[in-house]
Image (cartoon, grey):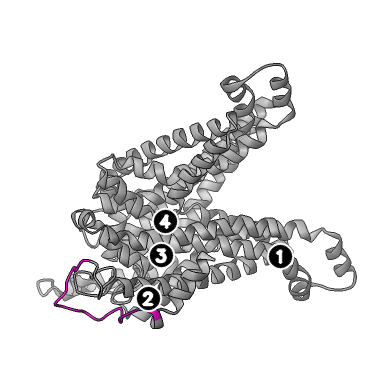
């Protein structure tokens, strides 16, 4: 319910936001909350509430998209390795272990630094989404590989093989439908992880480029402690982020028990 | 048996160095500006000097030579030179490494003490309120980005190591709580409780020893978590460690620093996991 309200508000930012996210009201820099600016303005005079709504849209679009990409890559890698077995399974396991032994944020920063930092804002969203999705495959791949390995010797798989089914058809027709609960759970687990990762990247100045807001870039206002003490509403993005991540974390156990 | 485990882990580490080194070399090779040398624009250099610089660059274009040279320099501790700071990367790491090791070390210790204490308390005294409060407290820190936790710790005036402790403790607590909860219902523990053993004694003598292998595996994984958390903590807290160095290198697109740091950390975390695996084998060998 709470997630639905937040998602509707975020995706309907164009309709709900009182102003455009980039419009600067130079006569009202760092203004406190008022009837015109419900959450005040930032140092460039931009409406904080509008930026929060548009930023929520970016973060809530980006994280599930990246989670979908990571799950797709994980499924391809994990399921293929487990089905083929032998050296390809060992190679996949080694690649997964190497990838998981890398501190996640270091890997993100290294690959991000290879790419130009001063890109167009729209392109920076794509870069961030691709980075998260393509680097976040290892943990779900391990789970998918374990699940497929246990299904490989199950009775329905043996029957499918005995009927002459092999390779691609085995994967698509027989394995994937049975993997659906696992894949869906991994997708739901990945979303809050990617929301937090995007927030960390944005806070470090490596995420979505200005003027497009995201939760990460909005959280950079927290670095100014003296302003935070006077304007506690600067915590609004952090509170919203915490609520969304909590909701996703609560969603996963309920989906697991339903499955 | 555990000697074989050690040998297997050492082979894994060597493979990590080779594969990680090749991946690092590939990143440096593909990095924008690789084929450009600013020295060619220096009007003070003679034609002979420029020619030798060009010959050097021609050699580097040969992939096999490039990879071989990169690995050879790696084994001699030559990690290249930082483009932004104009200093050898190895020197920077030696200077800043101990700061991060201390920060991550204390943070891990604090996180483990907090997590295990809470997990043992919720296991031993099965009270709904205590369980709810512990889980809520842990969940609070799971929902915030590491950088925000770092800022909150910084504003409260507490040592930065506490930020790492608060980042790693919820994950350790969740896993430890489940482990200890399952172990508490093991047959030998039920028998001990039936014989009148209670409280801390049952936890320390019967529950914990059975969970040591899993906790050791978790300890290996928590090292990765701590070093990952070090970047935002050092960046926002202005701590002069390798996390801050990595962040500045990312902003300055200083790939030799970033690639070397990533390789080093991969090796460190693999070593921690390998040590945990060897310890698990030793414990299990002792239990057999």
Q: Position of residue A247 (x, y in %)?
A: 52, 59
Foreground of the two, A101 or B116: B116
Q: Secondary structure at mark 1?
A: helix
Label 4–label 2 contact, CB within 8 A: no
**SS class, disc 3:** helix
Q: If you read the primary sequence from the N terminus, does the residue marked by circle 2 or circle 3 appear first?
A: 2
Q: Residues within 10 Å of mark 3 (few under 14, many from 20)?
A: many
- Is B283 contained in the magenta span? no
Screen quadrant of the C terminus of chain A: bottom right
Left or right, residue B245 beside residue B263: left
Looking at the image, residue B112 sits to the left or right of residue A118; the answer is right
Q: Which residue is mark 3?
A: A198
Q: Which residues are magenta?
A: A16-32
User: Which is closer to the viewer, label 3 or label 4?
Assistant: 3
Which comes before the other along the chain, label 1 or label 3? 1
Quadrant of residue A24 within the rendered picture: bottom left
Establish if B276 lies above or below B125. below
Cβ–Cβ under 8 Å for marks 1 and 3: no
Q: CA distance from mark 2 to mark 3?
A: 15 Å
Q: Are marks 2 and 3 in contact (CB under 8 Å)?
A: no
Image quadrant of residue A141?
A: bottom right
**Mark 2 and mark 3, same subunit?**
yes
Is residue B39 among what the camera can see?
yes
Image spot of residue A5 (x, y percent): 49, 70
Q: Return the chain for callout 1.
A: A
- From the viewer's side, name the closer residue of B246 and A46: A46
Disc 2 on helix, strand or loop? helix
């Amino acid at each position: 319910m709470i997630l639905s309200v937040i998602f509707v508000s975020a995706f309907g930012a164009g309709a709900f936001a009182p102003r455009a996210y980039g419009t600067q009201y130079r006569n009202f820099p760092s203004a406190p909350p008022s009837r015109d600016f419900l959450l005040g303005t930032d140092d460039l005079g931009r409406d904080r509430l509008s930026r929060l709504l548009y930023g929520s849209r970016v973060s809530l679009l980006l994280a599930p998209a990246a989670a979908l990409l990571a799950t797709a890559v994980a499924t391809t890698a994990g399921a293929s390795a487990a089905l083929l077995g032998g050296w390809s399974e060992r190679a996949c396991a080694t690649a997964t272990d190497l990838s998981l032994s890398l501190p996640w944020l270091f890997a993100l920063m290294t690959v991000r630094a290879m790419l130009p930092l001063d890109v167009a804002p729209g392109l920076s969203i794509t870069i961030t989404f691709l980075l998260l999705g393509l680097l976040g495959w290892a943990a779900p791949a391990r789970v998918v590989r374990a699940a497929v390995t246990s299904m490989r010797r199950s009775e329905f798989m043996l029957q499918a093989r005995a009927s002459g089914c092999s390779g691609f058809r085995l994967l698509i027709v027989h394995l994937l439908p049975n993997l659906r609960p696992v894949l869906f759970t991994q997708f739901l687990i990945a979303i809050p992880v990617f929301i937090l990762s995007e927030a960390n990247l944005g806070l470090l100045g490596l995420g979505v480029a200005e003027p497009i807001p995201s939760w990460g870039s909005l959280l950079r206002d927290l670095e100014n402690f003296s302003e935070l003490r006077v304007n506690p509403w600067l915590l609004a993005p952090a509170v919203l982020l915490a609520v969304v991540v909590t909701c996703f974390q609560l969603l996963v156990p309920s989906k697991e028990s339903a499955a | 048996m555990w000697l074989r485990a050690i040998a297997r882990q050492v082979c894994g580490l060597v493979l990590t160095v080779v594969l990680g080194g090749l991946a690092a070399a590939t990143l440096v090779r593909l990095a924008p500006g690789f084929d450009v040398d600013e020295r060619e624009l220096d009007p003070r250099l003679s034609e002979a000097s420029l020619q030798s610089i060009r010959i050097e660059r021609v050699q580097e274009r040969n992939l096999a030579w490039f990879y071989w040279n990169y690995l050879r320099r790696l084994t001699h501790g030559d990690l290249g030179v930082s483009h932004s700071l104009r200093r050898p990367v190895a020197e920077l790491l030696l200077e800043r490494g101990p700061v991060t090791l201390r920060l991550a070390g204390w943070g891990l210790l604090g996180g483990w003490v907090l997590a295990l204490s809470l997990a043992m308390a919720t296991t031993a005294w099965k009270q709904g309120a205590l369980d709810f409060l512990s889980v809520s407290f842990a969940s609070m820190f799971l929902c915030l980005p590491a950088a925000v936790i770092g800022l909150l710790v910084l504003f409260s005036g507490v040592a930065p190591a506490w930020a790492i402790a608060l980042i790693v403790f919820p994950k350790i607590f969740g896993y430890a709580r489940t482990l200890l909860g399952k172990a508490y219902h093991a047959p030998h523990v039920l028998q001990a409780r039936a014989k009148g053993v209670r409280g801390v004694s049952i936890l320390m003598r019967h529950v914990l020893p059975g969970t040591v292998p899993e906790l050791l595996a978790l300890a290996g994984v928590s090292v990765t978590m701590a070093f990952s958390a070090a970047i935002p903590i050092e960046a926002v807290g202005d701590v002069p460690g390798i996390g801050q160095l990595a962040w500045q290198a990312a902003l300055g697109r200083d790939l030799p620093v970033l690639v070397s740091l990533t390789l080093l950390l991969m090796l460190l975390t693999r070593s921690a996991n390998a040590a945990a695996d060897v310890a698990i084998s030793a414990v299990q060998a002792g239990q057999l």
